[in-house]
Image: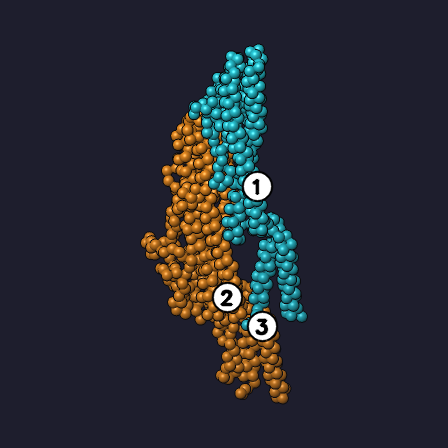
Chain colours: A orange, B cyan
């Protein structure tokens, strides 16, 4: 109960101050309506019973949907993991895409077609030159395809390196934010903004690597690699290092303390995990299979060729340069210089007594296209290639589907989060108007108290 | 659920982008003429079309082999027809000269005619197709018959692939047509020579014996002609079969790969409408939000 005019004036003043704070908060909310990750801030009016103390604005707090935050992290982690794979698989898909009528499949068909041409006219120079041309084209197509696959792996490694650097930056920033939040705890608005910023960084981090976040206390969080060591222990950040590269699989190590490296297990989730999986499983498998295919083809052709006879009676010549192992075969397959220099050395004949019309060796060569013993694992050359294309296509289709699913999940969870935390401008405008009216009413109260004072003074 | 402006804008952006992506996807088949452009769009389709395309290439190979071999055997067939005519002329000459009423002078004239026919026969035996000796088998760059009309070619010839697992003889060789002296046959040339010798010697029994040898040669020729005929027939049948298979494969390929333009166009129109509706809705919602805030 107001007991004096002074109290009336102070009551009005306190109400004006409280409502001005609330208007200031609403203004801040409106200003940050589009700030990513911003959680609308609120403060409660607290009724005051002390004389002259009508009301005050309580400590500012942010409205957060804690229940949804870990779901957002999980969805982003999965999105990053699948998107990382999609980015690399999309790079290699054109190399294995024959739908436009160009590519390894067509080069293989042309190669066998040319061998067939030689078989129908074994003494024809044009047919022999045609075979060399198509063999050279096939070798070139295999070389460039293998190179493209290798380069895709290198791109993945480069991307992984950048991602690791970004992860390290985020971890450091998180450590620093933890420190600031501890320091500014209780300062309401400032701390809440830092907590929002930290949540944003955790979102970013989860897109890049699989993490588990643990709240250490009310102020700071620790971040662990999924099922692994800590990346951040409250304010102490550790450093991630990428290992491997070139022909070796990529891995990661955690430096903790400085100079001491601990190997972390792969896969890791997030974009980094996706890149590593795409590079060291999908791309490597495609490259290995392409090598096996090229190795099988070169060996089968060479074995036949060495046993046959050229138009000039020569025998024992290799058609493709010898390949010691399957590793790197696709990138190194090449028509031998001896054959390139002299088409008459193409061994179409099985015997040197029936030259130039003997085509028996070349018929066996043509039959290689249907021979299921050419490529290791009991496959024809075409089957081996189809398998590579189908595997990559299926992998890509599957992860593209996952990405679409993850995108929707992220959108759904973010919408849920926003429904709790994001700013509604309409709501804030109504609040502003509400606070403004109250503010005006409070000012009117002061005016009335002032008028009363004046009336009393005039009475004297 | 509490709906804020940021939720509305985020969802509008998402839906509009999705509608835009759908329209691009719907338009791609019409732009490329193919239902799919990337294997990952439908890996099974990509696998099947790749196999069909390889089958087409193989069919082209086989068709080319068939055409080339048919060309060879057609020329051989015509040549054997001529060889048959020469043999008939020699047989007719032998029958007419075997008559005891003819004297040495008539037989000498007959010998000269037989010599001419024998030379024609030898000319056919060393005939060429596509610049190569057609009856020399695999030794195609060398005349199969030397000046003494001994066979110096390859008696077997090479094979040619005309089906996935079918090979046929790409050649008929001189010994199959004119007889193989190495196997004890009296060759057509020898029979003709024996006739000439008998006519020059005015040797009636010799003429009769040469006639019998010419008859055998003609029978051998008939067998060779039958072989050529059956190979041409086999080639023709395989050609028809390949054409049928090819048509079936092309139909399957078209069903798989080619765009159903009417369907694709209606899908594109639908996607375009959805995008338009999405953009219009976004505009309307935006206007409503703006009005409600500032009116």
Secondary structure under badge 2? helix
- The correct choice, above or below, for A454 with respect to A336 in the image is below
Which is more foreground, mark 2 or mark 1? 1
Name the residue rendered at 48%, 25% in the picture: B179
Q: Residues within 10 Å of mark 2 (few under 14, many from 20)?
A: some
- The correct choice, above or below, for B16 with respect to B208 in the image is below
**Disc 2 to disc 1, C-alpha distance:** 63 Å
**Residue A316 in view (yes/no):** yes
**Same-chain check, marks 1 and 3:** no
**Same-chain check, marks 3 and 2:** yes
Residue at the extreme top: B105
Per the rendering, the mark at residue A427 is 3
Quadrant assignment, res A443: bottom right
What chain does badge 3 belong to? A
Which is more foreground, mark 1 or mark 3? 1
| Disc 3 and disc 2 in contact, CB within 8 angstroms | no
* Lateral position of residue A234 relative to residue B100, left or right: left
* Residue matched to label 1: B240
- The correct choice, above or below, for A460 with respect to A404 in the image is below
Residue at the extreme left: A260
**Relative depth, front residue between A48 and A114:** A114
Residue A160 lies, in percent from the top left, at 43, 51
Residue B265 lies, in percent from the top left, at 64, 54
Secondary structure under badge 1? helix
Residue B161 lies, in percent from the top left, at 49, 37
Residue at the extreme front: B101
Q: Earlier in the sequence, mark 3 or mark 2?
A: 2
**Disc 3 to disc 2, C-alpha distance:** 22 Å
Residue B157 lies, in percent from the top left, at 47, 29
What chain does badge 2 belong to? A
Residue at the extreme right: B295
**Residue A39 in view (yes/no):** no
């Amino acid at each position: 109960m107001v007991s004096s005019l002074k109290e009336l004036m102070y009551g009005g003043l306190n109400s004006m101050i409280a409502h001005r704070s609330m208007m200031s908060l609403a203004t801040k909310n409106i200003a940050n309506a589009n700030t990513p990750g911003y959680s609308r801030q609120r403060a409660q009016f607290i009724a005051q019973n002390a004389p002259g103390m009508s009301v005050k604005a309580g400590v500012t707090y942010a409205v957060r949907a804690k229940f949804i935050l870990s779901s957002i992290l999980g969805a982003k982690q999965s999105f990053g993991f699948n998107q990382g794979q999609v980015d690399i698989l999309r790079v290699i898909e054109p190399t294995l895409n024959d739908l436009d009528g160009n590519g390894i499949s067509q080069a293989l068909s042309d190669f066998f077609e040319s061998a067939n041409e030689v078989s129908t006219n074994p003494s024809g120079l044009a047919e022999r030159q045609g075979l060399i041309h198509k063999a050279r084209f096939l070798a070139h197509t295999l070389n460039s395809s293998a190179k493209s696959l290798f380069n895709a792996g290198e791109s993945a490694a480069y991307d992984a390196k950048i991602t690791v650097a970004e992860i390290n930056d985020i971890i450091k920033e998180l450590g620093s934010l933890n420190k600031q939040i501890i320091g500014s705890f209780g300062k309401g608005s400032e701390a809440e903004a830092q907590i929002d910023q930290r949540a944003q960084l955790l979102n970013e981090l989860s897109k890049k690597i699989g993490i588990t976040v643990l709240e250490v206390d009310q102020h700071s969080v620790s971040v662990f690699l999924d099922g692994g060591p800590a990346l951040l222990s409250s304010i102490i950040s550790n450093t991630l290092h990428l290992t491997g590269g070139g022909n070796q699989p990529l891995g990661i190590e955690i430096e903790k303390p400085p100079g001491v490296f601990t190997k972390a297990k792969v896969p890791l989730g997030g974009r980094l995990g996706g890149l590593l999986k795409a590079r060291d499983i999908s791309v490597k498998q495609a490259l290995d299979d392409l090598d096996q295919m090229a190795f099988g083809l070169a060996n089968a052709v060479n074995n036949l060729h060495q046993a046959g006879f050229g138009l000039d009676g020569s025998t024992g010549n290799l058609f493709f340069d010898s390949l010691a192992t399957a590793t790197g075969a696709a990138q190194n397959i090449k028509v031998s210089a001896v054959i390139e220099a002299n088409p008459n050395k193409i061994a179409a004949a099985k015997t040197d007594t029936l030259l130039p019309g003997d085509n028996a060796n070349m018929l066996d060569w043509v039959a290689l296209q249907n021979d299921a013993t050419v490529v290791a694992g009991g496959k024809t050359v075409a089957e081996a290639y189809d398998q590579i294309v189908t595997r990559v296509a299926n992998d890509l289709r599957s992860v593209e589907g996952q990405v679409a699913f993850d995108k929707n999940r992220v959108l759904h969870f973010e919408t849920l989060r926003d429904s709790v935390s994001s700013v509604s401008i309409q709501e804030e405008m109504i609040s502003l108007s509400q606070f403004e009216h109250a503010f005006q009413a409070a000012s009117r109260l002061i005016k009335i108290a002032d008028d009363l004072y004046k009336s009393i003074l005039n009475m004297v | 659920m509490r709906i804020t402006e940021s939720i509305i804008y985020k969802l509008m952006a998402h839906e509009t982008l999705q509608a835009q992506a759908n329209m691009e996807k719907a338009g791609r088949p019409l732009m490329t003429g193919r239902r799919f452009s990337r294997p990952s769009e439908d890996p099974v389709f990509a696998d099947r079309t790749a196999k069909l395309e390889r089958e087409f290439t193989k069919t082209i190979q086989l068709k080319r082999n068939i055409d080339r071999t048919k060309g060879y055997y057609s020329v051989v067939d015509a040549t054997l027809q001529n060889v048959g005519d020469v043999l008939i002329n020699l047989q007719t000459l032998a029958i007419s000269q075997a008559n005891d009423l003819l004297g040495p002078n008539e037989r000498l004239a007959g010998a000269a005619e037989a010599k001419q026919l024998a030379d024609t026969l030898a000319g056919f035996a060393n005939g060429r197709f596509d610049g190569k000796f057609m009856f020399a088998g695999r030794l195609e760059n060398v005349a199969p018959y030397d000046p003494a009309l001994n066979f110096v070619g390859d008696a077997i010839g090479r094979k040619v692939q005309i089906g996935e697992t079918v090979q046929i003889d790409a050649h008929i060789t001189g010994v199959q047509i004119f007889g193989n002296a190495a196997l004890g046959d009296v060759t057509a040339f020898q029979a003709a020579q024996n006739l000439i010798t008998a006519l020059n010697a005015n040797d009636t029994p010799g003429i009769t014996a040469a006639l019998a040898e010419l008859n055998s040669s003609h029978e051998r020729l008939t067998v060779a002609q039958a072989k050529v005929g059956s190979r041409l027939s086999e080639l023709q049948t395989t050609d028809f079969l390949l054409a049928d298979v090819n048509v079936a494969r092309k139909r399957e390929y078209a069903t798989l790969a080619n765009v159903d333009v009417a369907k694709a166009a209606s899908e594109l129109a639908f996607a375009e409408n959805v995008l338009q509706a999405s953009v219009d809705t976004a505009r309307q919602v935006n206007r409503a939000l703006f009005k409600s805030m500032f009116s």
